[in-house]
Image: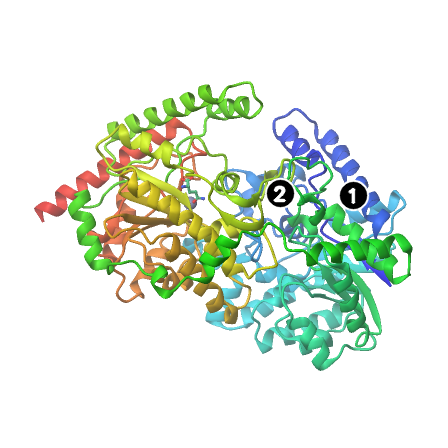
């Protein structure tokens, strides 16, 4: 049996990818140096692949994003970027002033650039897949050129239908106005894919790897027809290996009928693909690419179980390849450098490089090699041992009853009580939590972590920052204040470092977009809170002012969705464990006199499964986890914050969270969110619709802010409205933040006056 791996992280063990890109952007590297550096990295990756697996792709080292590469290959460059001039245009599209929109790739934390199609004239503009194939080929490798397939490409694209509305998702349009539009686009890109495949074949590529994860989304019959037809024609030009991932395919029987040589299935996300294989069999004339090593979680596989699975699969599939279940770029490059993980954890983990080793071990175990068989035994021994169990936590979760998820007083009554205590004006003003993380703040933190600054000094430094931000907010005249979050690097990592059962890594960097990296924590055991996490900073801030200061927590669903999580207990139980730990913090904050507590859930929506029919189960526990941690006393005003644009379809679930106040993003989605409330009957929660976009350095004018508020007032009673920016201010500069907030507060005051008179 042979092995295929794909999606190995491009970051490099020492984050070389990041240094190269940023060096080039800062002008420290020439274009030629950048290209040479990238090529060296690509060669390194090919070497790593080739030491472990038989088949691997070329074309995975995109200079920014693979979706952008595909758009450029197909000639989808919007007119505002002028004529295409190689890297200059490439980076303009990626990160220039009018860059393409960025959004999350399916239900992962990777952001891709959304292709914007302005018309239907596509052409092979720059053959990036050929360039990348030929490079590795010239170094003696025979990789499979990798492409994003036409269906997925279009399903993730936006088109410019009506200028005034801006780009609109092509697929949504097809749903509204009929499939023709989608079909026409497919017919238009299709010849370019043909040309591309022909060019790759002539260059000697014997097979191509085409990724179509969108085949795992909900699909209608007409879409399968189109996909079938498309692959029928594309197969004439190349030997196609078609892979899917992140979920089971939406229609197994249609999928295995597709006229291609090999079909890749994710056999990790859930059992559905396997059950379909058992039920319907697998075509004799095709190769099954069995995705059995998890590409997006960090656990070492139980190889014994994997061998059993392979045996089961081989009863149905004549020809089979062993592979990862989805791209490996969701994982850090290598486990080797981690030296400060909790006892016993390291041997249970497997990052990207170790996943390649697992593929190799499986293959060698099948060949009966001694070393590999030992690996199999060892991996199965480890996974059968319970690890980091805390009985008390388990008991607590097991004994939860419905009452634990209910606040003591209905919303309307507690709202009245809270208003009596807080005495807030109409249109209260606040911010989302963080204030500028200046160079000075970052320098102090790194001095502290590297031991150059004592704990005492660092704490004093943070206190100074807090004092400053409280004074600034009072001067501006905000109604509900924050402490500024200067002590936090990352809203999830901060809590992960303070909770037991969650590990943070030192080198476990993963790209989230472009050159931006983060280190996802690892939830490995039962989670509990050994000591208060935020009380000191919040109460200090509160001691400086008469105005209410918000306690600021990250919610359980977001902590879970932005971390790797254990697989030996159900996900909802992990969420409840985290929620219980946060509830203790809520109680401590209340005892310390904090009257407003915000629990951020920016990742609430994105953890939703690919298919609609799985949504209810997800949102049921996600909602409950939030309610569990936010069971504050009735007098405490509970806020939450979310920031993304696809809000409309989940509004019902969000309402069920039973918070008192929510702040959301609305400025980038051009009022789409506001209109969602027109259709929502009985919305009665306080809501702050972000009045300006914090992602832009521009200072919003009072007129712009007023426009958002007036639009909101058309669909929501003014008594429910709050006034705030659309997200935290940590990436902005003080020079931008102060005037922006001044305009915001003045606008609110002016409106109040007008409303009182009227
Ligand atoms: N409270 C956080 C902040 O202001 C929220 C961040 C977020 O929504 N991603 O930074
Ligand atoms: Zn936000």
Task: Where is residue 92? Give x, y as percent.
Answer: 58, 39
Q: Residues within 10 Å of mark 1 (few under 14, many from 20)?
A: many
- Answer with left or right where residue 384 lies relative to residue 398: right
| Residue 431 appears anywhere in the view | no
Task: Where is residue 29? Give x, y as percent.
Answer: 69, 26
| Quarter in which the N terminus is drawn | bottom right
Task: Where is residue 406? Give x, y as percent.
Answer: 32, 61
Q: Secondary structure at mark 2?
A: strand
Q: Nearer the viewer, residue 80 or 568?
A: 568
Task: Where is residue 272? Give x, y as percent.
Answer: 64, 72
Reply above or below: 482 against 55: above
- The residue positioned farthest toward the bottom in the image shown: 280
Q: Quadrant of residue 715?
A: bottom left
Q: Which residue is mark 2?
A: 511
Q: Residue at x 50, y 59 (%)?
A: 573
Q: Residue at x 29, y 63 (%)?
A: 678
Disc 2 residue: CB within 8 Å of ligand 1: no
- Answer with left or right where residue 332 lies relative to residue 5: left
Mark positioned earlier in the residue sequence (1 or 2): 1
Q: Which residue is mark 1?
A: 45
Q: Residues within 10 Å of mark 2 (few under 14, many from 20)?
A: many
Q: Nearer the viewer, residue 156 or 432?
A: 432
Q: Secondary structure at mark 1?
A: helix
- Answer with left or right where residue 431 lies relative to residue 70: left
Q: Nearer the viewer, residue 439 or 225?
A: 439
Q: Quadrant of residue 122?
A: bottom right
Q: Quadrant of residue 199?
A: bottom right
Q: Residue at x 37, y 61 (%)?
A: 651
């Amino acid at each position: 049996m042979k092995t295929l791996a794909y999606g190995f992280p491009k970051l490099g063990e020492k984050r070389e990818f990041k240094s190269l890109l940023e060096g080039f952007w800062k002008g420290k590297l020439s274009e030629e140096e950048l290209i040479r550096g990238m090529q060296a990295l690509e060669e390194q990756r090919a070497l790593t692949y080739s030491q472990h697996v038989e088949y691997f792709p070329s074309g995975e080292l995109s200079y920014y994003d693979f979706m952008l590469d595909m758009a450029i290959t197909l000639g989808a460059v919007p007119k505002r970027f002028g004529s295409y001039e190689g890297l200059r245009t490439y980076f303009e599209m990626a990160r220039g002033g009018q860059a393409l929109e960025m959004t999350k790739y399916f239900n992962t934390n990777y952001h891709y650039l959304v292709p914007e199609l302005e018309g239907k004239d596509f052409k092979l503009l720059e053959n990036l897949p050929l360039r990348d194939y030929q490079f590795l080929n010239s170094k003696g490798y025979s990789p499979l050129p990798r492409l994003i397939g036409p269906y997925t490409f279009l399903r993730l694209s936006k088109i410019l239908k009506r200028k005034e509305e801006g780009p609109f998702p092509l697929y949504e349009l097809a749903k509204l106005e009929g499939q023709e539009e989608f079909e026409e686009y497919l017919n238009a890109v299709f010849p370019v894919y043909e040309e591309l495949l022909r060019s790759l074949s002539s260059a000697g590529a014997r097979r191509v790897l085409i990724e179509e994860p969108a085949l795992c989304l909900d699909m209608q019959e007409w879409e399968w027809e189109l996909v079938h037809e498309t692959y029928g024609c594309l197969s004439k030009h190349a030997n196609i290996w078609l892979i899917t991932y992140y979920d089971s395919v939406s229609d197994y029987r249609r999928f295995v009928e597709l006229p291609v040589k090999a079909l890749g299935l994710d056999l990790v996300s859930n059992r559905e693909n396997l059950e379909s294989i058992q039920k319907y069999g697998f075509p004799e004339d095709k190769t099954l690419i069995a995705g059995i090593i998890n590409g997006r979680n960090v656990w070492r596989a139980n190889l014994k179980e994997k061998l059993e699975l392979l045996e089961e699969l081989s009863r149905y599939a004549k020809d089979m390849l062993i592979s990862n279940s989805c791209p490996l770029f969701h994982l850090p490059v290598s486990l080797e450098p981690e030296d400060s993980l909790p006892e016993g954890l390291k041997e249970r983990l497997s990052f990207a490089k170790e996943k390649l080793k697992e593929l190799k071990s499986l293959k060698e175990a099948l060949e009966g090699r001694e070393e590999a068989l030992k690996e199999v035994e060892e991996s199965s021994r480890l996974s059968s041992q319970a690890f980091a169990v805390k009985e008390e936590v388990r008991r607590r979760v097991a004994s939860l009853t419905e009452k634990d998820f209910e606040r003591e007083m209905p919303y309307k009554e507690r709202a009245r009580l809270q208003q009596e205590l807080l005495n807030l004006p109409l249109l209260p003003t606040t911010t989302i939590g963080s204030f500028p993380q200046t160079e000075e703040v970052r320098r102090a933190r790194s001095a502290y972590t590297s031991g150059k600054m004592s704990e005492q000094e660092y704490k004093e430094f943070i206190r100074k920052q807090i004092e400053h931000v409280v004074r600034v907010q009072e001067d501006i005249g905000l109604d509900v204040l924050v402490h500024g979050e200067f002590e936090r690097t990352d809203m999830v990592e901060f809590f992960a470092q303070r909770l037991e059962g969650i590990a943070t890594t030192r080198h476990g960097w993963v790209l989230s977009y472009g050159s931006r990296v983060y280190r996802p924590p690892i939830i490995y055991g039962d989670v509990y809170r050994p000591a208060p996490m935020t009380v000191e900073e919040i109460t200090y801030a509160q001691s400086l002012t008469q105005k209410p200061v918000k306690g600021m927590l990250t919610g359980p669903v977001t902590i879970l969705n932005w971390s790797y999580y254990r697989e030996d207990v159900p996900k909802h139980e992990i969420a409840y464990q985290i929620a219980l730990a946060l509830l203790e913090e809520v109680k401590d904050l209340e005892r310390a006199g904090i009257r407003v507590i915000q629990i951020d859930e920016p990742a609430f929506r994105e953890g939703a499964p690919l298919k609609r029919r799985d949504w209810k189960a997800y949102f049921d526990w996600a909602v409950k986890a939030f309610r569990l941690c936010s069971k504050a006393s009735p007098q405490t005003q509970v806020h939450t914050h979310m920031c993304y644009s696809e809000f409309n379809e989940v509004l019902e679930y969000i309402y069920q969270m039973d918070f008192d106040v929510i702040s959301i993003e609305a400025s980038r989605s051009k009022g789409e969110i506001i209109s969602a409330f027109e259709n929502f009957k009985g919305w009665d929660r306080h809501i702050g619709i972000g009045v300006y976009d914090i992602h832009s350095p521009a200072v919003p004018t009072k007129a712009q802010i007023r426009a958002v508020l007036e639009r909101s007032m058309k669909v929501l009673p003014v008594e429910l409205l709050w006034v705030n920016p659309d997200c935290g201010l940590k990436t902005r500069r003080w020079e931008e933040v102060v005037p922006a907030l001044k305009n915001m507060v003045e606008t609110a005051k002016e409106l109040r006056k007008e409303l009182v008179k009227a």
